[in-house]
Image: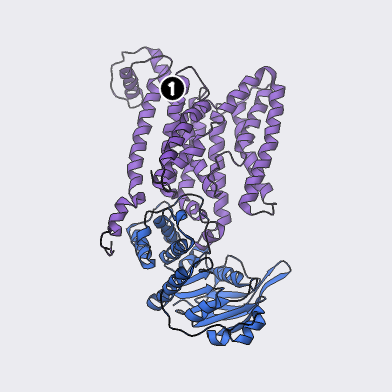
Chain colours: A blue, B purple
Amino acid sequence: MSELRLVDVGLAYGSRTALAGIDVTVAGGERVAVLGPNGAGKSSLLRCITGVLPVSRGMVLLDGTPLGELGRETIARRIAVVPQQVDLPFAIRVEEVVALGRIPHERAFRGPGARDREIVSEAIQRVGLDSFVGRDARELSLGERQLVLIAMAVAQQARLLLLDEPTVHLDLRHQVRVMDLLTDLNEREGLTILAVLHDLALAAHYFPRALLLDAGRLVADGGPAQVLAPDRVRATFGVDAAVWMGGARTGV
Amino acid sequence: MRVGVAPGRPALGDLAHTATPSWRRPAVVAGVGVIALAVSLLAGIAFGSVSIPLGDTVAILAHRLLGWPVAVTWPASSETIILELRLPRVLMAMFAGGGLAVAGATMQGVLRNPLADPYVLGTASGAALGASLAVLVPIQLGVLGLGLTQLLAFIGAVVAVALVWRLSRASRLGSLTGLLLTGYAVGSLLAAGLAMAMVLSGAQLRQIVFFLLGSLATATWQQVAVAAPLITVGVAVLAWRARALDALMLGDETAAHLGLAVARERVILLACAALVTAAAVATCGLIGFVGLVVPHMVRLVVGPAARPLLPLAAIFGAAFLALADLLARLPGELPVGIVTAVIGAPFFLLILRHVRTGYEL
């Protein structure tokens, strides 16, 4: 099972410190929300975990191996990242976007095989995009496009799924759909999920564990009720707010 | 394929046939392309200012190239025209056209810009400046059967791209924007040099203009022998890196998340595209349109995935330029660049009119 460990991770852009002293372990099959105000270092943290940004201090371990010892392709087979949005330069069908998730598994010259096509079909079905097959991904709504990108990540067949604000531009219906899907992928297929979220209520409702970042430091790690206690929210976000924790998990 | 069937909607397996043709159709499209290629090859050899009966053409090819025992009933001049003039010319057109189309598809993908063409990073202006200098310098020099014009054009194209690449790395803009704007700036500078050379050229201006408009009239076997391997190697490497081109469509960061060493792959792709372009431009001059539009035409049919796109762009680019060259020489040696634009642009507009959603034709 995928296990992710960050040991004293620090990241500096020039003289500016983006992350400092981050110690976190995420066990395989966990579902973790990464929270914090703008500029807290949430996206930087994701980039360090995938190795796109090399850490300035400490190390990131994937299944016990330092990230630096793994090639990009090996990392891509273990970590799939759902980007916020992708600006596609050419018209491209939904299933062609999803098929790009197979890139880390492909060999040069050999196109996608029957097995790859099957995996792509399954990912499309898993995310519920059957009726979008054949359509230009650029003509879909933001919410639908987010689902396409999730399907691409599912086709990548990595055990660890990272998402950077997957619901940020979405209406309520799509927010719930994305969250239900992530929960389902986590509970049924055992994918480890780490998602940067802005919506604290959504995080509290759907995630059993949350990390709270503030100014590049990890200020809280635990259950949402504990991490999002009113005084902590006030200290971190500078607003008086109570995050609503109640309610049954329902689809809209 | 394990798929559920929703009522009233075909299963995904069937959709793969109807709405998802991208896994199937490239073979059909390639078949059409190969036929077009064969037709343009034969037509390019058979037709010209001197009329040679089609039967003689086929017989000469069969006799001399395939070694078939055919009775020689044609004049020796026919043989010379076909084997020494038309065949190298048609082959040169095919290599240049295919190469430019593949280079254009690559530039568009790497720069994530549908308006990019093979010349966008300075190859055209570099080659043009090199060629015009060769026209000005009164030295006759030949290497490998290439004249000074071809040599300097090739060097100019390669140096221009290298310069653009080097300068763009100092840019603080995003790497792609920096690259495009640097290409534009360097291109403008070289164009100024070209304009100066044209002013100074006096009676030789015609030669420079000839180069700028592109022509295959001077194609020789030696040129084919030098340019074809360069183009073939460049195209083969690009086809080998097809999935890198696919990943880059999604942007640098997502490409890295898909396992790509982004910086390295971009250098490989741009270098190969530049090499192919330089080889084509040095031998044929600046032939526009092929590298911009053929990739789009192919994308409209089979989608943007590089694995069908690059080989199909090569096939159709080759056929297109061979036919354009034929049309250019029938009325008596027009510059082929004029023909590619005059024939190609309306055809492209026609296709665009019939594109309803996305690239569905």
Residue in the image at 28% along x and 61% along y: B1
The C terminus of chain B, quarter of image: top left
User: Residue A82, percent across and down?
Assistant: 49, 66
Residue in the image at 53% along x and 31% along y: B287
Along the viewing direction, whichever of B179 and B277 lies nearer the viewer: B179
Along the viewing direction, whichever of B11 and B108 lies nearer the viewer: B11
Along the viewing direction, whichever of B136 and B185 lies nearer the viewer: B185
- What residue did someone put label 1 on? B86
Residue lying at the far right in this picture: please name it. A15
Number of residues whose C-alpha sits closer than 10 Å to that of mark 1, classed few (under 14), some (14–19) or many (20 or more): many
Quarter of the image holding residue A121? bottom left
Is residue B38 placed above or below A113 in the rendered structure? Answer: above
Q: Secondary structure at mark 1?
A: helix
Quarter of the image holding residue B58? top left
Residue in the image at 64% along x and 39% along y: B160
Is residue B227 placed above or below B167 in the rendered structure? Answer: above
Quarter of the image holding residue A135? bottom left
User: Residue B150, percent across and down?
Assistant: 59, 29
Is residue B359 placed above or below A142 in the rendered structure? Answer: above
**Quick check: can you spot residue B88?**
no
**Quick check: can you spot residue B77?**
yes
Q: Chain of mark 1?
A: B
Residue in the image at 69% along x and 28% along y: B195
- Count the numbered circles shown: 1
User: Residue B35, percent across and down?
Assistant: 34, 34
User: Residue A109, percent across and down?
Assistant: 42, 51
Residue type of the residue flagged with mark 1: Arg
Q: Is residue B341 left or right of residue B126?
A: left
Residue lying at the far top in this picture: please name it. B75
Q: Is residue A81 left or right of residue B312?
A: right
